[in-house]
Image (cartoon, rainbow, N blue to C red):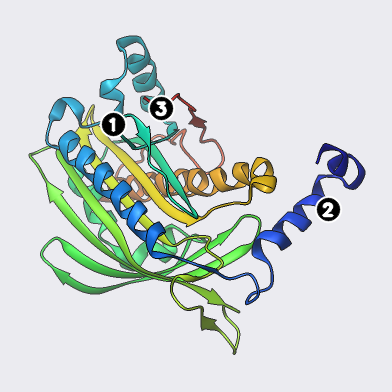
Amino acid sequence: MAALVTRLGIPLLLVGVAWCIAGRQNSYAKELTQPTVQAFAHYVQLTEARIQTEVSDPRQFLYSYSLPEKERNAVQAYLLGGHVIIEPMVTRENGRVIHIPDGMVHHWLAIGFIPGVTRDQAIALAQNYARYAELYAPDVQRAEILSRENQSFEVYYRFYRHALVTVVYNTRFTADFFTLDASRGYSFARSTRIAEVENPGKDNEREFPVGNDHGYLWRLNLYTRYLERDNGVYIQIEFLGLSRSVPPVFAWLVNPYTRSVPTDYLTHYLVATRKALQEASAATQRTILPRSSLSARKSKTVVRFIKPA
């Protein structure tokens, strides 16, 4: 493989890998099998059990609370400085890795701090789905509330993502919001339908059969926590997705791109959310807030690859 890189160069190799992974639209479809579905559902069940334990205890509400004091203080200072921290996550069962046959789990955590706003303002923006295409483009092309009952929503999203290939999805999610006390809240957003779109935007646009597509994204859950503190709000998100597995011969090259998708999405989401909340706060207060260090140009994201427990 090293000789191939030397002779052909990285750009040409990337084209080859993209073709091998994406393939022709119909010839390289991958079916989501029941063993994959069941294994991922078990992973989700264990993950959500841990999250429910953490959100019910103020001492565990943010991930940084579990860090040693010196590291916790460093993370706190970094967040208050306007930066985003992202970490890979792993859910284990009795200390053992949970095997997902023919599937790959993408599990990440991101946290940021937004000064000058409240928890309720952050949750209100999260529920303002009509603005998602405006705020979170190009990742979100369209969003629409299909139904609502109190703090529970059913939402349609049209997602766009470009990494090795460009992919568009029509999706449906349920989203449930909870407030625990005067300062804490959280939400669970779970995909109920993800359909990859063939020929998006063209006259012959159509959906692949659900679960029988290229397998770039079969499932996606987003678990968000809101904590009002330090004259602002902390937002912590866990991204938990499922895709097809990558052939081992290409894993060394594809995995960095695979990691970049959730990290780029989470960074963009927190940056855009901060901008929208601070602009709304400034308009309400009729004051000019200091220019944030967490802007589209100047934000700094730290991806911390810690050894899983």
Q: Is residue 137 above or below residue 44?
A: below
Residue at mark 3 to residue at mark 2: CA–CA distance? 35 Å
Q: Tell me the crowding category of disc 1: few under 14, some 14 to 19, or many 20 or more residues within 10 angstroms, Cα based.
A: few
> Which residue occupies the extreme top position in the image?
70
Report the label total.
3
Q: Are marks 3 and 2 in contact (CB under 8 Å)?
A: no
Mark 3: amino acid:
Pro
Q: Earlier in the sequence, mark 2 or mark 1?
A: 2
Which label was assigned to residue 20? none
Q: Disc 1 on helix, strand or loop?
A: loop
Please, what secondary structure does the residue beneath circle 2 have? helix
To which residue does mark 1 refer? 94
Identify the mark at residue 12; answer none if there is no mark.
2
Residue 240 horizontal side relative to residue 19, left or right: left
Q: Nearer the viewer, residue 245 or 219?
A: 245
Q: CA distance from mark 3 to mark 1?
A: 13 Å
Q: What residue does disc 3 label?
A: 308
